[in-house]
Amino acid sequence: MRKRIVAGNWKMNKTYEEAVALVSEVVNMVKDEVTGNTEVVLCPPFVYLTTLKQYIPAGGRISLGAQNCHEKASGAYTGEVAASMLQSIGVEYVILGHSERREYFGETNAQLAAKVDAALANGLKPIFCCGESLDMRENGDYIGFVKTQISESLFHLSPEQFANIVIAYEPIWAIGTGLTASSQQAQDMHLALRQHLASQYGEEVAQNTSILYGGSANAQNAAELFSQPDVDGGLIGGASLKSRDFTTVVKANN
Ligand code: 3PY
């Protein structure tokens, strides 16, 4: 049975004190909620990862994730963070290919393929983001566009490697806009993506892959989104910054 995951993408938010307070509250509020095949992943900014690790019960179902990593192993890349560094401090997941990174930092499908390789080589599980713009949704082959993001960045992986991938479908038009995909729009895309995975890796791998919905998922709409058969949880932006809202989203995933 595939995992149901709620991951909180804090983006570039919170001071040190605020980050410690938020993680302590979240851990207290959700630790008894994550049971069975559910998991919670907290993705704060890099600088807080080491400290926040100490607030997360070891061996439980709450893990830490980073929001990015560099594709190279080490070297003269000022300001960057390598996957091996994340592994060495106990980080388990890494968000790759968020639309903000694609848009503001020019990340391409090919570069993301290299980042995925670096993450996997260091034992990190990529939460691979994909999604179309509003223009693409209204005027283009938006399902084909998202499938290509996946093929070009992930389909070089072996089935064994692919077993460590989590997909997050995040329509760009629903990020930071207050717009959310309807649960039917999310389900339609998730099903199309699962079929795409099946065409490359077979039905079993496709059925075992967690496909999360992201893009203004929140305490109000999570239960409806998560009730769809191919939606296996969420990558949560703004609502992950408030412990109560995030806890409601986590409970909606049970
Ligand atoms: C959002 O919910 O806006 C996100 O971008 C989550 O990654």
Image (cartoon, rainbow, N blue to C red):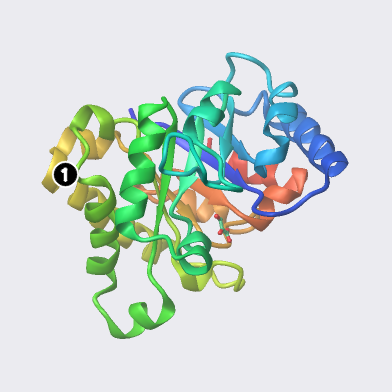
Residue furthest top in the image: 59
Q: Residue at x 54, y 41 (%)?
A: 6
Asked whether residue 41 is in view, the answer is yes
Q: Is mark 1 within 8 Å of ligand 1?
A: no
Residue furthest right in the image: 17
- Considering the numbered disc 1 on the image, is that residue within a helix, a strand or a loop? helix
* Tag count: 1
The residue closer to the viewer here, 66 or 210, is 66
Location of residue 148 (image quadrant): bottom left
Asked whether residue 253 is in view, the answer is no
Along the horizontal axis of the image, is 88 left or right of 124?
right
Q: Residue at x 27, y 68 (%)?
A: 145
- Residue 196 position, x and y percent, is 19, 52
The residue closer to the viewer here, 55 or 174, is 55
Quarter of the figure that contains the N terminus: top left
Up the image or down, 224 lies above or below 63; here it is below
Location of residue 141 (image quadrant): bottom left
The residue closer to the viewer here, 239 or 17, is 17
Binning the other alpha carbons within 10 Å of mark 1 as few (below 14), some (14 to 19) or many (20 upward) gives some
Location of residue 18 (image quadrant): top right
- Residue 35 position, x and y percent, is 55, 23
Figure quarter occupied by ligand 1: bottom right
Residue furthest bottom in the image: 139
Q: Residue at x 62, y 46 (%)?
A: 249
Mark 1 lies on residue: 198
Along the horizontal axis of the image, is 31 left or right of 231?
right
Along the horizontal axis of the image, is 20 left or right of 241?
right
Amino acid type for the residue under numbered disc 1: Ala
- Residue 27 position, x and y percent, is 72, 29
- Residue 155 position, x and y percent, is 20, 46
